[in-house]
């Protein structure tokens, strides 16, 4: 399968990177075996594998050859390239695609290399770091665009700026969010902004078991703990592994929060509204368009910056619907399953519905708005098993 085709498959894909060291972080995994890692990443679900061939990252073209001998997965040759000879060497070593960094290339050179890459039957990942470079990539008609969160001069990571650019990228291109992904929620943030895949290197190389870390980043469903009103409960849920933290801002709810509390950038905050919304600092908005005749309706939409990104399928307020799971299983697109979920049944619900995310609130409480930490941990563990 071609590099671009592998990244265009449904769901969030990942380009897993073989990288021994980083100029900003120093040694990551000096003894990394590119053949072993390439095979492990392919088995763990990587859509493609990136191999650093630059000596500043502890890599050589021989690493690419070793990876090619170990897997049939699409390979990206990653480094700083500007000539036909460099591209041809990568192709001969087994690369299916090559990185072209707009910071280092003018438009004429990039256009020439894009044409030459296509002539060789390869793909190119054209990398942008800011709005001007994204515009250049679009004007060059690059089919695959990478948005790097890392400033290559300062090495600083700015995920907020990256996600803004991802959201602005045209939907008829394959968009890759590069750098800065260490958790499932951060990967999901890129996905919801519009990324087709994430490129992950340092977090894999630092992990005790890189292939297990890759599986974790790609695993679904995401786990949401909702109805939070106390910072200590937010902190505990994050520590226990929750991806999404929900704050109900509807006046009529017994679990109404005064505000969206502090959530670290390893997770995502969700503001929950019923019938109307107002400005919020939350990463996402969960909006029930009607109150269902009491506190909320049974279906909501999850929004990112005003754009719908998922459906929330719930049960009627304080009622049980025996066909809820089967109805949800038939729904298309991203589905967050809510209503009646807890440690006792969330695993069965996941098996029946295969949702993008699961959401629990009242079953995790000792009283409305106050969480039972033991039940929160049990629910998250069951959902992530």
Image: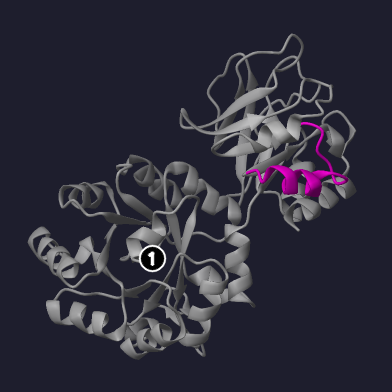
User: Image point 88% across, 42% down: which residue?
Assistant: 372
Residue 185, above or below 28: above
The part of the chain drawn in magenta is 339-355
Residue under label 1: 155
Residue 33 higher or lower than 342, as above or below: below
Q: Position of residue 227 (x, y in %)?
A: 76, 32
Q: Position of residue 70 (x, y in %)?
A: 46, 85
Q: In the image, what residue occupies the spot 38% across and 81% down?
A: 57
Does residue 216 appear in the picture of this structure? yes
Q: Is 287 placed left or right of 250 in the picture?
A: left
Q: Nearer the viewer, residue 206 or 217?
A: 217
56 shown above or below 178? below
On the image, the x and y values in percent for residue 151 come to: 34, 61
Question: In the picture shown, does residue 242 fall above or below 57?
Answer: above
Q: In the rendered image, which quarter contains the N terminus?
A: bottom left
Residue 338 visible in image: no
How far from the left and from the top, in percent, is residue 185? Answer: 59, 50
Residue in the foreground of this view, choosing between 367 and 191:
191
Residue 341 magenta-highlighted: yes
The quarter of the image holding the C terminus is: bottom right
Label 1: which secondary element: loop
Which one is in front, 29 or 34?
34
């Amino acid at each position: 399968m071609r590099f671009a085709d592998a990244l265009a498959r449904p769901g969030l894909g990942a380009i897993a990177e073989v990288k021994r060291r980083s100029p900003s972080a120093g040694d990551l995994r000096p003894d990394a075996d590119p053949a072993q890692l390439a095979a492990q990443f392919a088995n763990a679900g990587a859509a493609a594998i990136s191999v650093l061939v630059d000596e500043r990252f502890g890599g050589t073209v021989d690493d690419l050859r070793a990876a090619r001998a170990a897997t049939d997965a699409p390979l990206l040759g990653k480094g700083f390239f500007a000539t036909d000879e460099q591209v041809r060497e990568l192709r001969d070593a087994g690369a299916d695609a090559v990185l072209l960094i707009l910071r280092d290339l003018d438009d004429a050179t990039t256009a020439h290399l894009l044409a030459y890459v296509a002539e060789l039957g390869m793909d190119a990942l054209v990398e942008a770091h800011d709005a001007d470079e994204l515009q250049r990539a679009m004007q060059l008609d690059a089919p695959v665009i990478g948005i790097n969160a890392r400033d290559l001069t300062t090495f600083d990571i700015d995920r907020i700026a990256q996600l803004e650019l991802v959201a602005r990228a045209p939907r008829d291109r394959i968009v890759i969010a590069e750098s800065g992904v260490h958790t499932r929620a951060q990967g999901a943030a890129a996905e919801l902004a519009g990324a087709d895949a994430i490129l992950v290197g340092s977090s894999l190389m630092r992990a005790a078991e890189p292939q297990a870390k890759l599986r974790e980043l790609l695993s679904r469903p995401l786990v949401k703990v909702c109805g939070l009103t106390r910072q200590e409960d937010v902190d505990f849920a994050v520590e226990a592994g929750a991806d999404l933290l929900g704050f109900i801002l509807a006046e009529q709810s017994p679990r109404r929060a005064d505000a969206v509390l502090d959530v670290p950038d390893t997770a995502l905050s969700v503001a929950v509204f019923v019938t109307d919304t107002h400005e919020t600092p939350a990463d996402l908005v969960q909006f029930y368009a009607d109150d269902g005749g009491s506190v909320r309706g049974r279906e909501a939409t999850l929004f990112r910056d005003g754009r719908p990104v998922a459906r929330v399928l719930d049960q009627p307020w304080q009622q049980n619907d025996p066909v809820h799971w089967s109805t949800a299983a038939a729904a298309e697109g991203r589905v967050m399953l809510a209503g009646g979920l807890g440690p006792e049944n969330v695993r069965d619900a996941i098996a029946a519905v295969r949702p993008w995310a699961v959401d629990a609130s009242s079953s995790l409480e000792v009283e409305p708005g106050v969480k039972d930490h033991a039940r929160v941990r049990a629910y998250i563990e069951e959902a992530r098993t």
